[in-house]
Amino acid sequence: MDPSLLRREAEAIGGRLTAWRRDLHQHPEIGFQERRTASIVAGELRALGLDVQTGIAETGVVAVLQGERPGCTLMLRWDMDALPIQEAAGAPYASVHPGLMHACGHDGHVAIGLGVAQVLSSHRSEVRGCVKLLFQPGEEGLGGAERMIAAGVLENPVPDAALGVHLWNVRPVGWFGIADGPVMAGAELLEIEILGQGGHGAAPQQATDPVVAAAQVVSALQTIVSRNLDPRATAVVSVTQIHAGETFNVIPDRAVLRGTIRTFEPEIRQMVMRRVTEVTAGIAAALGCTARVRLTPLTPPVVNDPAVSAKVRAAARGLFPDAVVDESERSMVSEDMAFFLQAVPGCFSLVGSADRERGQGPAHHNSQFDFDEAVLPRAVALLAAATIDLLSEA
Ligand SMILES: [Zn+2]
Ligand SMILES: [Zn+2]
């Protein structure tokens, strides 16, 4: 398959990609309510003659594109949900729904997915096997991937490999992050309850103060990354919420802390979780309190298969000889593509989407978020080329 042909075809539908993206951006829908989005997706895929199923895990859409020659099955996954953020960017295509915004770029992902479906449809004679297109609801911490898997999307046909992308606004258009191994961190929810004995704010000697214990726990937890972790390794321990007390002159009975742990490797994850529990219990005991620590796994790390990633990198270099293909970019953010890649070998690529002149765009999940739409045809070309190559070499 000639890469320059695919690149030209993707560029030729650039206007449609932008139109889809802007329409979706104007009409953001929160996880599991992506009804309008899903009906646009299903309509476009049916118009291409694909076999389309809707209503999977509420609003998910799955379509199968059958190539003209027998072969393996490759899965492409896109997420569709927006965030509960009031948009402040002021673009002509800004959200018309107050308090809802596509601030992560999933509007772009859906447009890219439709573009890939269109390009691959016109190359069925070159597609070996089949391409399973998955449009997933509820990626933003809502469990969309797990619900899609529970609904059976990894069966009938079973994918042999899986690909996905995320627009990446910390890098400019023309940059691709395609690494081997863990590329996005696993996340746990951390909840700590510190129990003391309340009393008068003016008589601390009669109380056991959980607020003072909570303050010391927050500080001591920072020593896990700075003192227990190998300095060459990576982890995050963030306490993001502290709740205690109702008024100024009463020492409360309890303090509640919440936060998150991010790690890439299972051994580091185990060590950090063990130390969080030990440090919290030790500090609380030293100050006469008791502590309960609860750690809830949210998302495993996104782990790329080296063989699949190598093929995606080759596709990127073949299409864009001037591109920067970064093999080392990793992020502490988590992504539920992880659940698909636990089951199927694959590659999740980051695609630079910031303005080429400025090199840096507004942050994901920020009310000013927007990306350079020049990324859309590039991402379409990358996924279409990688899909054809992976299926033909399988
Ligand atoms: Zn997000
Ligand atoms: Zn996202």
Image (tube, helix red, strand yellow):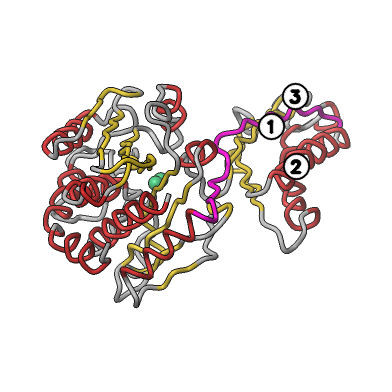
For disc 1, the neighbor class at 10 Å (few under 14, some 14 to 19, many from 20) is many
Q: Are marks 3 and 1 in contact (CB under 8 Å)?
A: no
- Residue at image mark 2: 217
Residue 133: x %, y % from top left = 30, 39
> The disc labelled 2 sits on which kind of residue?
Val
Q: Which mark is residue 198?
A: 3
- Residue at image mark 1: 192
Q: Are marks 1 and 2 in contact (CB under 8 Å)?
A: yes
Q: Do we see residue 9 in this rendering?
A: yes
Q: CA distance from mark 1 to mark 2?
A: 10 Å
Q: Residue placed at 60% from the left, 27% from the top?
A: 246
Left or right of 59, for residue 295: right
Which residue occupies the foreground of this view, 358 or 171? Answer: 171
Q: Residue placed at 29% from the left, 54% from the top?
A: 384
For disc 3, the neighbor class at 10 Å (few under 14, some 14 to 19, many from 20) is some
Stretch in magenta? 288-307
Q: Residue 381 lies in magenta, yes or no?
A: no
Left or right of 383, for residue 312: right
Q: Which of the two labelled residues, at mark 3 and mark 2, occupies the earlier sequence position?
A: 3
Residue 188: x %, y % from top left = 61, 37
